[in-house]
Image (tube, grey):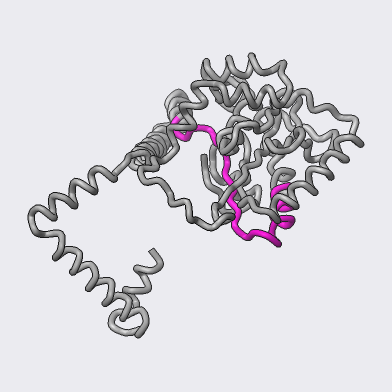
């Protein structure tokens, strides 16, 4: 996954790796839900007036709560071509390939249940769930919890058309016109996808200004390895060296992500409590607390007075 900071297709192409699809994320609330319902009605009218069929696309309705992120990623992967000859280099693996084959003949709701019932998918989804060691209080005001929704944009491998896949919609929405198709390996679909994303941002901007756009891309390690092999076969030593550097950078990034995810999944509460008990037993906890309170008071005084190293305070606040 690559986070994008622009909807401009040129910026997306500058990633330098094959893009399998886009995922648009926005905050879900009452106003956003109303806009979403209106868009669904318009999409249904558009679909009924069109003679094109969407049977080629693998579309699953979202029937499992709090799984729209996982389903958005699967919506991209399960509709892309596989194999080196496809131009994407995508390998679904045995489990996803078997799941796709099993659910191919099902209706969208049953496909959603099949995705939710797949043990491998459930395990992968749960692996990114942070621990909740302390239960939240029940006196929280209603309506304060934030919810988000994910929508996928993917060129279908079966018919070459670009689709918007929203698990809360009644079906897929074809974009770019009824006759627009994009051959495997082509990135011409990015313009139509960017236009659709910009239209959604404009529609939701009255209720929300925070959006996120991500690209599902080919593994940079695999791309660099292929580039290194091609350069070596061609006798291009500088090209092979550049590819090795790119692969080392990709390996380092994946290692950092793995460490970050491990920290996020770890419950640090027992360690923290044990450390506090140890400090209290050694008579060091009270001085630490006093020093922390003193530091916080000094920082608050500097922030309100605007003096005494205001530049440093600004840097702390920005971080």
Q: In which quarter of the image is the C terminus?
A: bottom left
Q: Is residue 55 above or below residue 176?
A: above
The residue sitting at 46% across, 32% down in the picture is 126
Q: Can residue 103 be seen in this view?
A: yes
The residue sitting at 69% across, 49% down in the picture is 197
- Counting labels gives 0
Question: For residue 311, what is the image quadrant?
Answer: bottom left
Which residue reaches farthest left? 282
- Left or right of 57? Residue 299 is left
- Left or right of 31? Residue 99 is left
Residue 114 in percent (x, y) is at 61, 21
The foreground one among 151 and 224 is: 151
Bounds of the magenta segment: 196-221
Residue 179 magenta: no
The foreground one among 199 and 45 is: 45
Q: Can residue 245 be seen in this view?
A: no
Q: In this view, does 135 lie above or below 258?
A: below
Residue 170 in percent (x, y) is at 77, 34
Residue 222 in percent (x, y) is at 46, 29
The residue sitting at 49% across, 32% down in the picture is 125
Residue 279 in percent (x, y) is at 13, 54
The residue sitting at 18% across, 69% down in the picture is 291
Which residue reaches farthest front? 139
The foreground one among 266 and 142 is: 142
Question: For residue 86, what is the image quadrant?
Answer: top right
């Amino acid at each position: 996954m690559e986070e994008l900071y622009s909807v401009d297709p040129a910026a997306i192409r500058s990633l330098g790796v094959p893009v399998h699809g886009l995922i648009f994320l926005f905050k879900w609330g009452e106003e956003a839900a109303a806009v979403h319902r209106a868009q669904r009605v318009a999409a249904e009218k558009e679909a009924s007036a069109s003679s094109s069929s969407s049977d080629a696309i693998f579309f699953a309705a979202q029937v499992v709560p709090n799984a729209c992120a996982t389903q958005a990623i699967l919506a991209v992967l399960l509709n892309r071509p596989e194999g080196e000859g496809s131009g994407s280099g995508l390998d679904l693996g045995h489990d996803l390939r078997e799941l796709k084959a099993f659910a191919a003949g099902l209706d969208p709701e049953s496909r959603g249940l099949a995705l939710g019932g797949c043990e491998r998918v459930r395990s992968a989804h749960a692996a990114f769930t942070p621990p909740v060691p302390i239960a939240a209080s029940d006196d929280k005001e209603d309506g304060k919890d934030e919810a988000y929704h994910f929508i996928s944009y993917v060129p279908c491998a079966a018919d070459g058309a670009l689709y918007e896949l929203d698990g809360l919609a009644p079906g897929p929405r074809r974009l770019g016109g009824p006759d627009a198709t994009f051959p495997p390996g082509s990135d011409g679909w990015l313009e139509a996808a960017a236009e659709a994303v910009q239209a959604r941002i404009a529609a939701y901007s009255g209720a929300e200004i925070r959006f996120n756009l991500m690209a599902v891309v080919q593994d940079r390690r695999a791309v660099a390895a292929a580039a290194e092999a091609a350069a070596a076969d061609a006798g291009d030593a500088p090209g092979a060296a550049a590819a090795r550097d790119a692969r080392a950078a990709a390996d380092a990034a994946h290692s950092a992500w793995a460490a970050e995810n491990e920290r996020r999944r770890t419950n640090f509460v027992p360690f923290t409590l044990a450390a506090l008990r140890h400090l209290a037993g050694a008579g060091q906890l009270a001085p630490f607390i006093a020093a922390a309170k003193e530091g916080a008071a000094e920082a608050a005084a500097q922030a309100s007075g605007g003096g005494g190293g205001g530049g440093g305070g600004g840097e702390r606040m920005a971080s």
